[in-house]
Image (tube, helix red, strand yellow):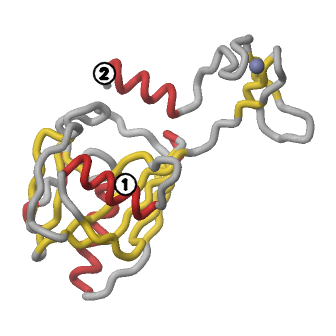
Amino acid sequence: MGGVASLAGAFRENITMNYCSQCGQPVSLLVPEGDTLPRHVCTGCGTIHYRNPLIVVGAIPVWEGKILLCRRSIEPRKGYWTLPAGFMENDESMQEGAARETREEALADIEVGELFATVNVIHVNQVHIMFLARMLSPEHGPGEESLESELLLPADIPWADLAFPSISFTLERYLQDLERGSFGLHTTTIRRRRSKG
Ligand SMILES: [Zn+2]
């Protein structure tokens, strides 16, 4: 894992906070009165800096039986394939976030459909939420965070080169449901970090 990934990981995993973002004084890690977990509490102004899981929203964009994947141009997991997905922003719905990420990463317009998969990714403090989606045209291409984008038949999915376990889970369940002819809602929990990458 490279330097950028390590920095991002440290930030996402709530490992370090040294100074208060409100007043600049040092923070201490302690359990506030009435709370049950240690928090970063400012020694100057008393602000409690809560850090909670982040939501990642994404889509399974489909055009005429093919699934849109993109290959990451950024860490973590640079060079590996993923469904369009990313951190949800303030002032948007989950569905708007999934459509935005698909536009940004794969330059494709989608109609977001039903909720399809939720994945608790405990070791990075994230929840990944994936939606079914229909592409509004076959047009796509690599956005700034992608090296390339491809519409792939199920048989051509690069299983060994997928970026994240949550993406593998989502695609496996999608193909199973496709075979059954009925799409459900799927949930799993991933607790361990990968051994490589
Ligand atoms: Zn402060």
Residue at the image position 72 percent from the left and 16 percent from the top: 23
Residue at the image position 64 percent from the left and 37 percent from the top: 51
Residue 154 image point, x, y percent: 13, 68
Residue 24 position by quadrant:
top right
Give the labeled residue for mark 1: 166
For the residues labelled 1 and 2, the Cα–Cα distance comes to: 21 Å
Residue 61 position by quadrant:
bottom left
Give the labeled residue for mark 2: 2
For the residues bearing labels 1 and 2, Cβ distance under 8 angstroms: no
- Mark 1: C-beta under 8 Å from nearest atom of ligand 1: no
Q: Which mark is residue 118?
A: none
Considering every residue shown, the one lying at the far top of the view is: 25
Is residue 59 shown above or below 2?
A: below
Residue 69 image point, x, y percent: 18, 55
Residue 184 image point, x, y percent: 39, 80
Q: Quadrant of the N terminus?
A: top left
Residue at the image position 10 percent from the left and 76 percent from the top: 64
Q: Quadrant of the C terminus?
A: top left
Residue 44 in the figure: left or right of residue 122:
right
Disc nearer the start of the sequence (1/2): 2
Is residue 189 shown above or below 177?
A: above
